[in-house]
Image (spheres, rainbow, N blue to C red):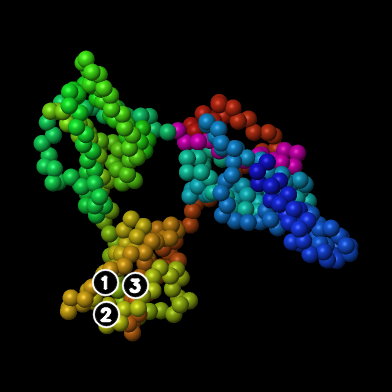
Amino acid sequence: MMFATAPFLAAMSAHSRGAFPVATGRCGGGDPFGGYHPCDLFAAMMMEHDSEFEAEDDKNKYSTRISVPGADANSTQVTKHDDGSFHVKVKSADGKRTIFDRRLQLPDDADPTSLRAAVVNGELHVAASKMAKPTPVTVPVSADVDNDDNNNDSNDNENDNKPYVLRKNVPGVAAEDVQVTVDDDVLRVEARRRGETSTSYKRTFAMPEDAERSGVSATCALGVLTVRIPKKPVPVPVAVPVSDTIPEAEQRHIHLAHLNVPGFKPSDATVEVTRGMLRIKLSKENGEKRERFASLPDSVKNHEHVHAAIANGVMAVWADNAAVREPAEMTVDVSSTPLALDDDWVMAAEGGDA
C-alpha cells in the first residue's frame, strides 16, 4: 500500500520524536496521540491535494491500493477530469467522518477514460490502463541527391518553421542499406556498409516537441545520409490590446505580469500570447526597446480574455476568470467487488467497452 501506510507510520515516528505535543482531549489526558484519535491524524494527512498518482507500474496499467477502514463503495466518490487528474473523497459508511480527500494526477501515459475504482473490505483499489503507444513507422529512404540548400536548414531557431536536419557522412552505404524509424518520440537511424570491411552505424535521437512526425523524410546519396524533420505549423499569436487604465487588483482575477515601464505609453507596447507564453515588446520613437517573456498558467486557455494596460509608468497584464478553462469532469462508478485487472480488462478499457 503506497498512500496510507507510509505517511501514517511517518506520523507515528514523528510523535515518538516529540513532534506531536502530549495534550488532553477527547481521548483523555496523557493520551499518546496528543489528545487526538489516530484516525483523525490519519485523515488530516490524507487531505492533501494535487499529489502525484503513486502507483504500481506494470506493462499495461497503473494500479494502487489505499486503506480506507470504515468505508464502503457507497461512501466513496471518484471523479475524473479531462486534464488527467481525478478526485477521491472517501467517508466512513455512516457518513460521519472523512477518511481520504485528495486530488491526484495520473501519469502522462495513463488513459483517463479507463480509470476504475472499487472498495472492498476497507481498501480502495484504483487502476488505469496505459495508452497504447503509436506503431513504429518506417521512413522510406530515397537514393535521390538532396538538393535543398544547406543554408535553408535550421536546427536551433525555434522562431522559424524550417525543418530540423540531420546529416551523416556514410561513404560506401547505399540507400537500401539504411533504415530510418520513427518510434513514438524517438528517431532511430541504422546504416550498414557492405563489403570486405563491413561497418554499421546506429543512432537514436529524441524528437523535438514541435516535430511533425508524419512528415519525416530521408535520402542517402553520394555517401551522405540526410534526414529532414518538419516542424508543426507555428500557431498564430493572439494580439492583446493595451489600454491606459489598470483596474483595481481585485478586478484583475489572474495576475500574469507586472512591470515598471517609466516613459512608455500604451501605444509603445505590443503584447502577444502564443505557445503558452506571454511576449511583451516595448519600443519608443527614440529607439529604446525592451522585451519580456512570461509563462502562462496551464489553466489559461481562452486567450481572448487576456488584457494589458500601461498607466503612470506601470504595466500590468492579467486575465479574466473567463480565460480559465475548467476541466470537464465525470463520475467514476465505484464497485463493491474486486477489480479484475487482467489483459482482457486492459484491452476492453482501451477500446472503451469496459
Q: What is the C-alpha distance between the residues marked 2 and 1?
A: 10 Å
**Image position, residue 246 (x, y; %):** 38, 79
Where's the C terminus, which quadrant?
A: top right
Location of residue 237 (image quadrant) = bottom left
Q: Is residue 334 magenta?
A: no
Disc number for residue 308:
3
The amino acid beneath tag 3 is Ala
The amino acid beneath tag 1 is Arg
Determine crowd level at label 1: few under 14, some 14-19, many 20+ residues with C-alpha closer than 10 A.
few
Mark 1: which secondary structure? strand
**Image position, residue 309 (x, y; %):** 33, 76
Q: Which residues are magenta?
A: 118-132
Of all residues, the one furthest to the bottom in this rendering is: 312
Label 1 or label 3, whichever comes before in sequence order = 1
Label 2 or label 1, whichever comes before in sequence order = 2
- Which of the pair 242/39 is nearer the observer? 39
Disc number for residue 290:
1
Q: Which residue is mark 2?
A: 264
Going by the image, does 248 lie left or right of 292? right
Disc number for residue 142:
none
